[in-house]
Amino acid sequence: MLAANAASDPDSKQAEAYRYVRERIVSLELAPASLLDEQALADAIGVGLTPVRQALRRLAWESLVVILPRRGTIVADLHPADIENIFEMRLELEALATELAASRATPAELAHLDTLMERTRAELAGQNSPDALIALDRETHGALWAASGNAQLERTLDWLYVHLMRLWNYALPRIEGIPAMTADHLAIVDAVRARDAVTARRLMHDHVHGFQLSFRAAWNTTRGAHLPNAGA
């Protein structure tokens, strides 16, 4: 209900507070496991405490913060088990969304994907900016989710991607092969355009699995933690 209410009033103070805090959690400006100061957040946003507390309840529902009764609210930490759960879900749901997109994408959605691929080619042939490639990754995956024709699936993948972006920002300096992973989208969209659902699903599965392997390597370097090898 919190999510639905905020979505129905995107200009509300609650929605403003939600966007502000979520963006700073994802960017790591609010560090994992850090204690949040509700009054400081309210002052920074320019709203009262009530919208901030409503936003924090929604973020708790999304597993981005943890509300501790009588102790306060902390930013959710990054735990190996949670990361693996996200990876398992995303691996299968991204593949499903892409398979559905190959069957259901409208001409307008295919045209949008073509535009994104033109931008991707230009970036890969030019600066290869990590920030630009990550933005294109987000847009491309979002376009494929939308083309799946399944709104529930799209919302679930959007939620998973928020967590993915926090992980990505944490490990980005150590993740290798971002241009090659971005280039995977070209073949994926070609399969979607060809209405080849089987190939589209396989390519997306391989793409997501490849990112997960790269992230595990970066995580192990950063934290010295061993993540289980969930097979693809």
Image: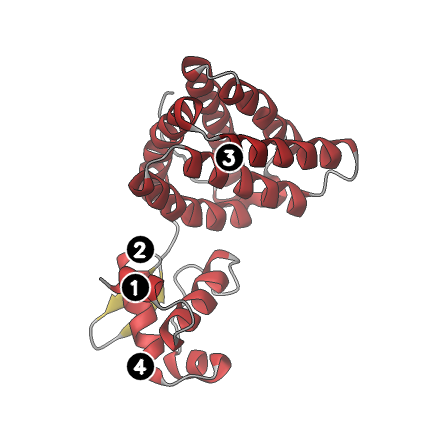
Amino acid tagged 2:
Glu
Badge 2, how many Cα within 10 Å: few under 14, some, many 20+? some
* Residue matched to label 4: 50
Q: Which mark is residue 109?
A: 3
Instruction: From the viewer's side, name the closer residue of 14 and 161.
Output: 14
Q: CA distance from mark 1 to mark 4?
A: 13 Å
Q: Earlier in the sequence, mark 3 or mark 2?
A: 2
Name the secondary structure under disc 2: loop
- Type of the residue with mark 1: Arg
User: Marks 4/2: CA distance?
Assistant: 19 Å
The residue beneath circle 1 is 58
Along the line of sight, the residue nearer the viewer: 219 or 30: 30
Looking at the rendering, which quadrant does residue 228 occupy?
Answer: top left
Q: Comparing marks 3 and 4, which lies closer to the viewer? A: 3
Tell me, for residue 62, which label it has, or none: 2
Residue 31 visible in rendering:
no
* Quadrant in the picture for residue 34: bottom left
Disc 1 from disc 2: Cα separation: 6 Å
How crowded pointer 1 is (Cα within 10 Å; few <14, some 14-19, many 20+) is rated as many
- Dot 3 or dot 4: first in sequence order is 4
User: Where's residue 210, x and y in %?
Assistant: 50, 26
**Callout 4: few (<14), some (14-19), or many (20+) C-alpha neighbours within 10 Å?**
some
**Which amino acid type is shown beneath numbered disc 3?**
Glu
Relative height, residue 32 to residue 78 (above, below): below
